[in-house]
Image (tube, rainbow, N blue to C red):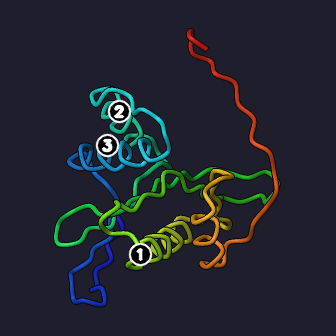
């Protein structure tokens, strides 16, 4: 489990760490917050918590948390897999979330810097993520961190019975 501690510019104690079973509610709360901001109604709380527990049990899949004075203020999911094109491990970031009261203070930058350190420590040679095409502030943020923009189209098919 990765743990890094320091302080923000106002002297508040910060800690980044990988989530454990006791973090299911906190992770679910942040995920529900970002879903609602993106116009998506989150699944029922029990279903979301069940999925988070399942994810936490999967090898190569983790949630990185940033805590401020014991409160989970930000998180992202790290998914390690193998790339045949790179012939190496790669890390996809998903669900990058900084809770609204903590935005604009550099916590997202700290979180993603720690995500990169964590991915490197686990042998990844590439870090990548996707952002909604309309989410221009996120695009600017990722560029400010030195991530390169790659053009591609994302395709999906709903496989649920309702789809």
Q: CA distance from mark 2 to mark 3?
A: 6 Å
Earlier along the polypeptide chain: callout 1 or callout 2? Answer: 2
In this view, the residue in front, 88 or 105, is 105
Residue tagged by mark 2?
48
Picture residue at 79% right of the left edge, 51% below the top:
84
Circle 3: element type:
helix
Residue tagged by mark 1?
104
Earlier along the polypeptide chain: callout 2 or callout 3? Answer: 3
Q: Residues within 10 Å of mark 1 (few under 14, many from 20)?
A: few
Residue tagged by mark 3?
28
- Residue 132 lies, in percent from the top left, at 63, 50
- Residue 52 lies, in percent from the top left, at 36, 39
Quadrant showing the N terminus = bottom left
Picture residue at 67% right of the left edge, 72% below the top:
147
**On the image, which quarter does residue 103 sit in?**
bottom left
Give residue 75's mark: none
Asked if marks 2 and 3 touch (Cβ < 8 Å), the reply is yes
């Amino acid at each position: 489990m990765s743990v890094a501690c320091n302080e923000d510019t106002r002297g508040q104690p910060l800690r980044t760490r990988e989530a454990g079973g006791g973090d299911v509610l906190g992770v679910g709360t942040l995920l529900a917050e970002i879903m609602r901001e993106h116009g998506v109604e989150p699944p029922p709380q029990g279903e979301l918590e069940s999925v988070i527990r399942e994810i936490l049990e999967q090898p190569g899949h983790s949630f990185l948390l940033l805590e401020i004075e014991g409160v989970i203020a930000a998180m992202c999911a790290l998914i390690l897999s193998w790339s045949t094109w790179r012939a190496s491990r790669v890390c996809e970031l998903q669900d990058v979330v900084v809770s609204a009261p903590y935005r604009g203070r550099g916590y997202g930058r700290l979180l993603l810097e720690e995500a990169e350190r964590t991915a490197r420590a686990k042998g990844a040679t590439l870090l990548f993520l996707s952002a909604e095409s309309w989410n221009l502030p996120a695009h600017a943020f990722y560029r400010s961190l030195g991530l390169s923009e790659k053009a591609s189209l994302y395709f999906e098919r709903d496989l649920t019975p309702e789809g």
